[in-house]
Image (cartoon, helix red, strand yellow):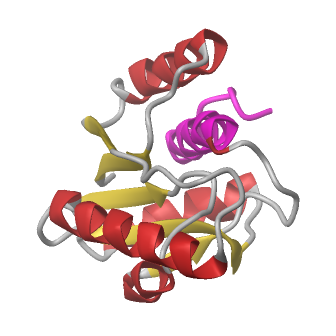
Amino acid sequence: MPGLSFLFAGKMREPHFEAAFAEYIKRLGGYTKCEVREIAEQKLPERPSEREIAAALAREAREFEKAIPKGAYVCALCVEGEQRTSEQLARKLGELDGRGVSRLCFLVGGSYGLDEGLKKRADWRLSMSRMTFPHHLARVMLAEQVYRAYTINAGKLYHK
C-alpha cells in the first residue's frame, strides 16, 4: 500500500482531537509510513470578504504545493468531492497500490477549505460528507477512515 502524507492548514489545538488523530496515525504505522505536516493557516478578519478569503487560500495553496511530496498522488478533501463508503475507499487505495502509486498525499484545508486551483490540481477530490465539520475533526475522521481502509485491505476485523 502507498505511503501516506497528510498536509493540513493550521495547527490542531484541541487535545481531544490531537489524541484521537495521533492514535490513528500510530495504528497506520503498522501498515505504512506516515508523514504529517501542517502549514500556516492564513489569518483573516472576523468577517472576511470573498476577495480576502480567495487571497488567503491562494497563499495557503502555494505552501501546500511546496509541501506535496514529488510524484505523490494528491487527494484534496472538499465538500464537492466524491463520497465513498469505507469499502470503496479501501478498494481505491488498493487500486492505487496496484497502479504503483508509492505515495498518497491528503490535503485538508482550514476554516475556509482549499484554493480552487489546488483542488483542480489534485488527482482526486474526496468528500467525507455534504455536512460541514470542524476541519480539525475532519483530520481525525480522515485518519480513522484511512486506517479502516488499510484494515479492510489486510482482512482484519476492525471495520465491522
Q: Which residue shows up at 44% across the image and 76% down it?
A: 55
Q: Is residue 85 left or right of residue 10?
A: right
Front residue of 104/80: it is: 80
- Residue 101 in view in this figure: no
Is residue 88 shown in magenta?
no
Front residue of 114/93: it is: 114
Q: How far across and down, in percent of the image, does residue 53 sit?
A: 56, 70
Q: Which residue shows up at 36% across the image and 50% down it?
A: 7
In the image, is residue 9 above or below residue 65?
A: above
Q: Is residue 19 left or right of residue 123?
A: right
Q: How far across and down, in percent of the image, does residue 49 sit?
A: 65, 74
Residue furthest left in the image = 70
Q: Is residue 130 left or right of residue 127?
A: right
**Quadrant in the picture for residue 128:** bottom right
Prevalent SS, magenta region: helix
In the image, is residue 46 above or below residue 97?
A: above
State which region is magenta: 136-160
Residue furthest right in the image = 131
Q: Which residue shows up at 36% across the image and 33% down it?
A: 31
In the image, is residue 92 above or below residue 43?
A: below
Q: How far across and down, in percent of the image, does residue 2 sit?
A: 30, 54
